[in-house]
Structure formats: structure tokens, C-alpha cells
Amino acid sequence: MKKVCLALLLFCSACFANATADTHNPGSSDTITIGIADEFSPDFWPQVLGPTLEYLREALPHLTIKTKEVDLQKTNSLKSSNVDLFIAPPLIFWSQLLENGASAIGMLSPSHSKDPRTSTAGVLITKADRIDLKSEKDLSSKKIAVRAKGLNHEYLLLKHWLSKKGMQLEKSADVLETGFRNPGVLSAVLSGEADFGLLAYCELENALKSGALEPGKIKVVSESQTPTEVCSRTTALFPNIVVGAYPNTPSDKAAAITAALYDMPVLKNTYRWSYANGFDSLDEVAKELALGPYQYLQEWRPEALWKRFSTEILLFGALVLAAAWHIFRVNRLVALRTEELRTALIDKQKLSEKEKESREKLSALEKNGLISHLSSLIAHELKQPLGAITNYTAGLKAHLAAGEPDPELVNHVLDKISQQSRDASSVIDFVRSFAKPSSPAGAGTVKCDLSAVTQKAIETLRLSGNFSGEINTDISHTPWCGADPKGLELALYNVLKNAAEACGHVSKPCINVTIREYEGYVEFSIADNGPVLTEEDVHRILQTRISTKKEGLGLGMKIVENIVEKCGGHLELQRNQPSGLRVLIQIPIEKL
């Protein structure tokens, strides 16, 4: 039936075209051939194709427009049929685009859809009283009526939709082809010849509107219709029928056909031709169903296998090469490491003999270092009391040489000399305890008056004559604390002496001494207004054997730190603002 309609339509169109061409351009020889896929329903010919060809021949009298029906089941490609343009379902166009570089010049836009890119779909139907058939899962072992298999558009869309759900149509159901007679699919479902049927988008609504189908007789399976759509559907929406052109088609002819299609008025059945784009959604369908350039996905020839699995093959080859290289590299490394171990064992035997000698030398060096350290400590700390004794002795001699000595002054100086001698002795005792680093923190501490200890250290500094600046104190109301009084006095004197030396070259040297209770500690704060220091300078002052004074031994702050730690406390250095150094000594109150 379809063949007869096509023959009559082509004969009438040819006669009309020849008459028109003879009237408008009798000498014209320009010809363009349009290939027409055979996968269209009979209604498409009189409703769309015939009026379109008639309009093109009227609008383009200088062209001789010929048509050629192409059986896609027998022809591998529209391109092999020697056509310039073609009219085909969108999936057929997409395969031509990928294989032969075709381009779309027009797309059919039906009235039931605002966008021709989403105007076709497959509709799965069954009888309304079949309560046992509710979803696509019920297709198993059932019969489904379709117009045609092969490259029929709705059939391909349903196959793709089912494959995404893990089903294969031809393996799940028995497919019955009714051909393009009307109402073939509907009759097969209503008569019970088939359990399911497959219709095109809006075909069910058109049958109800025309009276060919009574309402309530048919239901849509797995309906996906949205509120804005006028027709029911099962599958996703895809583009509509396409007019395509091949790259070798003369551009002036393709442009003329394109312009005529866009100028063509709306057909009586409310179809029109519009701009064609948005075919990306078809690529997934073509790949899933192995259509067109994706046919190799179902072949097992070496070339097809390479196309399908080239990435995997390359990766597998790369893994094999990597594994071989890894084995070679591991074996090489094992050989190298074995040789290194052999050499290391020989070297170890040689070094073991030197190790004993080195330990003996190191022990001697450690003993010499300890002796040097203690010698430096004694020299550093005895310098102050011996110097004071020397000063007092020199002063006493001068007083006696002047004649008429004052007994009270002589006794006072002798008392001071005696006190400094006792201080020197206490220094010796302290150094002996200092040489025992294994003594626990707090060993040898007694209850002492911190204010008195601090005052004594300040007085010693003043008597030394090494500082002529101002000393500000805030040391009242200080608690008694457990500490080594002589060691603490020595530590405070060292800090005061360092502060005096640091600010000795400023115009108005000043030292601020404060004692307070702070979070369970008695905190001594001694700050000077010496030169501006960096954080690196502050850190360096605490390092053993590093001194900022040319004549210094580099032991002052280290001695102070050790004394404080023996009292169970800790020492902290800070940059004073705006200049100088601030020393914080904290002794825990719980040592009382």
C-alpha cells in the first residue's frame, strides 16, 4: 500500500514539476535528488512529504527536484544511493552525520510540541482492562505489536529505553510486525492478538480525536508525560524528522532548499519546517543500539575489536610492559643491595675496631669538657666576691695609711671582707652541687625570704661599682618560697649584672625589678633599657657558650637557667619594649 501511494505521489509531483519547469525555465538542466527513507508511515506522505515537495517545486522553478526512495534495510547508507539531500528519521540522520559528514538544514516541527528537538517518542500501550500488565517488566514472555522492526524510529527508541532498564526487547518479548496499515497496532492490541503495542508520539491522542478509538479502551504503560505536554509517552523525547545535506551537495542548491523550507507556510495538519539542531541526545541511542558508525560494537572482527577495546588493549599492554620493567628493576635493585650489604659488612668490621678507640677518646673528651665547664663556672662566679675583697682591702689600706684610723669603719670593712669570703665559700659549695646534674629539682632548697634575696643581689650590684644608673624596684609583699637562697641570689645577680652591662652605654640606664604572685608562681621580672634586640638575639643569649660580650664566657644565662630549674622553676627571655631585654624567673609557691 505504501509503495502504491509513493508511486502515485511521485508521478503526480513529476508531472506537475515538469509542467512548472517548462513554464518558468524551459531550458534549465539543474537537478537535485532527494533521498527519502522508507521508514515513514503512510500518513506522512500525503500530510507532509507531498505538500513539501510541491511547495519546493513551486518556490524553486529553476531546479529540477527528483525523489528517490531508499530501502535502508538493503542499503548500507543513504550516501551510496547517490542523493544530494535526504529526508529521514533523526537517528538515520545522526548516523549519516557521523559517517559521511552530513548536515541538517531543516527539522519537522509539529504543533503538539513547542520544540522540534523534543517532539518524538515511543508510546507503549495495552488494553485498559489488563490489570496484570502494569509496567515494562511485564513484557517478559508477552507479545508486542509494532509497525516495523529494523530501523523504525519508535522501535529503536523503545529498544534504547528498555536497555537502560536492563532489558532486551527482542529477547524479552515476542515482536509482531503489523506493517504500516491503520490502525494495525491498535487493532492487534484491542483484539488480543498482542498484549502490548508501540505507537508514535501523539498517535494515541489523534486516534481518540478522530474517533478511531473509543475512550477508556487503551492505557499507556510506564507513562512519563509531564504537566506541560499534550500527549502521553513512555520513552524520553527526541528530535523529529530531518532534512539533511551531504558535504558535496552544491552550496547554492542546499541554501535555496533551506530558505524555501523556512519560508514554507504551516501545513494544513499544523506541521512546519524549522531550524535543525540539538542532536546530542541521539548519540547515546546510536551507541547503545550499535547504529551507523557504532556498528562495530556488535562485531568481532579484529578491526572492530580494536575500535571497541583499543583503550583497554593499550592499557593492558602498558601494564604488561610496566610489570616487566618492575621485575627487571627489582632484580637489579636486589643485586645492587646485595653488593652494598656485602661491602657494608666489610666496612662494619673495620669500623667496629675503630669504635672502641673512638669511645675511649670520647670519654676522655667528656671528662675534659666537664672540667673545663666547672673551671669556667668557678672563674665566672668567684670573680665578683674576690673583686669585692680586693676593693675592700685596697680601701682599708688607704684608710690605715692616712693615719688615725676609725675603728668603726675598720670593723665595718672587715665585716664586709668576711662576708665576701663567706660568699666565695658559698660559691664553691654551689659549684660542687652544680656539678651534680642528677640531683632532682628542688634538692637543697630551704624556706627563704625572696625580697631579702633580691635586695642582697641588688646591693651586691651597687657595691661592685659597675652600674651607676637607676634601679626601680617593686618587691614588697612577696611570699616566702622554697629555694636555694645562695643559688637564687647568684642567679639574680647574674641577671642584674647582664642588664647593667647591656644598658651601660645608653644616656639614662635603668633597670626595673618586680616580684609578684602569678598563677601559683612567684615571678621575678628584671627589665633593662639596653639596645633593641631581635628574636634571634634573644634566642642566642640562652645558648650555652654563646656570649654577646667580647670578654664573656658565654655561661651566664645557662648558669641562671640551671639554678632556676634546680628550684623547680623555669626561665623565659622576652624583648622589652621599646628596647632592651626582659628576664622572667618563675619559682613555684608549692615549694614552701
Image: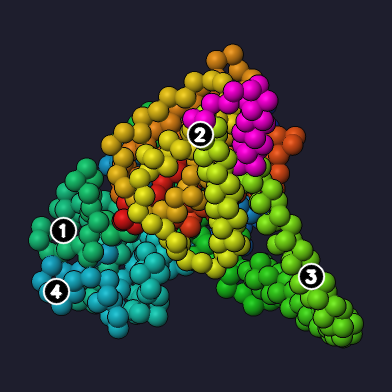
Image marks 1 and 3: residues in contact by CB distance under 8 Å: no
Q: CA distance from mark 1 to mark 3?
A: 115 Å
Q: Secondary structure at mark 1?
A: loop
Spatial distance from mark 1 to mark 4, Cα to Cα? 17 Å
Which is in the foreground here, disc 2 or disc 3?
A: 2
- Few, some or many C-alpha atoms within 10 Å of disc 2 (few <14, some 14-19, many ≥20)? few
Q: Any mark on residue 130, and which? A: 4
Where does the C terminus fall, quadrant-wise? bottom left
Instruction: Kindly identify the amino acid type of the residue bearing the numbered disc 1.
Output: Leu
Give the residue type at disc 2.
His
Residue located at (30% from left, 44% from top)? 479
Which residue bears the numbered disc 1?
A: 213
Task: Say left or right for 35 vs 1.
Answer: right
* Distance Cα–Cα, label 1 vs label 2: 136 Å
- The residue to which callout 3 is attached is 364
Q: Residue 375 in the image: state x and y as whole percent.
A: 71, 55
Closer to the chain start, of discs 1 and 3, is: 1
Label 2 residue SS? helix
User: Disc 2 vs disc 4: Cβ atoms closer than 8 Å?
Assistant: no
Residue 337 picture location, percent across and down: 82, 80
Camera-side mark, 1 or 4:
4
Work out whether residue 254 or residue 527 is closer to the camera in this orientation and state it.
Answer: 527
Residue 507 visible in rendering: yes
Q: Nearer the viewer, residue 169 or 382?
A: 382
Disc 3 on helix, strand or loop?
A: helix
Query: Which comes sooner in the sequence, label 2 or label 4?
Result: 4
Find residue 153 and report its image quarter. Answer: bottom left
User: Where are the magenta residues, as a range?
Assistant: 384-408
> On the image, numbered disc 2 is attached to which residue?
412
Compared to residue 256, the image places residue 345 above or below, namely below
Query: What residue is rendered at 74% in x and 78% in y?
Result: 323
